[in-house]
Image (spheres, helix red, strand yellow):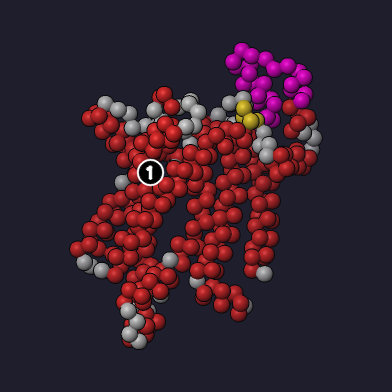
Amino acid sequence: MYIVRRVGLMLITLLAISFATFWIISLPPGDYVSTLVAQAETRGESISAERIAALRDRYGLNDPFLVQYWKWISNIVFHGDFGESFAWNRPVSTLIWDRVGLSFFLSVSTLLLVWAIAFPIGIYSAVKQYSPGDYVATFFGFVGMAVPEFMLALIFLYIGVRFFNQSAGGLFSPEYVDAVWNLGKVLDLASHLWLPVLIISISGTAGLIRVTRANLLDELYKPYVVTARAKGLPEWKLLLKYPVRMSLSPFFSTVGWLLPGLISGETIISIVLSLPTTGPLLFGATESQDMYLVGSFVLILSALTVVGTLLSDIALAWWDPRIRHRYQGS
């Protein structure tokens, strides 16, 4: 019943988001076809009357607003057709999916590195509060949170050019940029991937260390921990079974919010390092007012946020028995 209610609310929210998104991309004067014609004229090109009529019929631009909305959302849901980008003169779906894979791989790699480093250090820092190790972790945590990621990217770019005569930007060497996927291209990606992963993970690791430490300190001195320790439960078992588990509840409550981040990635870092991910594509589409491309991004990221929130609710109810008992008792 809990999941059914959450799914129902999610579907209603998605419907409202899709309607608001289409309304927003319809706000600029004119429509998609008039913008496309204007863009063609600035390049000294022309679009045939037959193509203009076909595009107006495809998107229902001569129909009322609700009919246009239905054609747009039904094309997305049933055909995967997000419209066309007039800036790129390509279908929006191909533009997005061409870059989603790299964005997802970069984000997942960063996420796994952050978790692998932050959780053990955060737990150690809380258990060994005010120890030299705690002070060191706290110091680097504050430094990592204070230094902007784009500054780190610029520093690494300078070091690469100044001392190694090699650009640190991009995810591929020039000879592999347009090459088909093969073992050489995968290895070349791996050789370039470590730098953006390192830069993005620094602030994420620092923040998660602080959150893990603070949450665990809140749990370590609660009565149930004192009672379990008085019963003679081994310290390591007590720590992992109770306080660590409870301190991770805030993490599970927000883990679903990572979904849109897996697609959008770190936009500023991607621009500085010239990474072929979705972030720069979204930024460029916003600058050029490419409404179908921007609208598709907004819809996808909003949908991922809603779906991620649902997954977080389910994960939290599974992880924390207090949530289950609270719901069952209500």
Q: What residue is drawn where x is 31% and y is 60%?
A: 121
The C terminus is located in which quarter? bottom right
The N terminus is located in which quarter? bottom right
**Quadrant of residue 293 within the rendered picture:** top right
Q: Residue furthest front?
A: 183
**Residue position for label 1:** 197
Q: Nearer the viewer, residue 300 or 41?
A: 300
Q: How many marks?
A: 1
Image vertical order of residue 135 relative to residue 60, above or below = below
Q: Position of residue 161 (x, y in %)?
A: 28, 28
> What is the chief secondary structure element of the magenta stretch?
helix
Q: Position of residue 78 (x, y in %)?
A: 73, 42
Query: Element type at marker 1?
Result: helix
Q: Nearer the viewer, residue 115 or 261?
A: 115
Tell me if I can see residue 275 in this picture: no
Q: For mark 1, does the 10 Å Cα neighbourhood hold few (<14), some (14 to 19), or many (20 or more) residues? A: some
- Left or right of 318 on screen, residue 124: left
Image vertical order of residue 175 relative to residue 15, above or below = above
Q: Which residues are magenta?
A: 27-54
Q: Is residue 228 magenta?
A: no
- Left or right of 44 on screen, residue 122: left
Q: What residue is drawn where x is 67% and y is 33%?
A: 83
Q: Is residue 48 magenta?
A: yes
Q: Position of residue 246 (x, y in %)?
A: 43, 71
Q: Position of residue 257 (x, y in %)?
A: 51, 54
Image vertical order of residue 61 relative to residue 66, above or below = above
Q: Residue furthest bottom?
A: 231
Tell me if I can see residue 134 in this picture: yes
Q: What residue is drawn where x is 59% and y is 54%?
A: 307
Q: Amino acid at mark 1?
A: Val
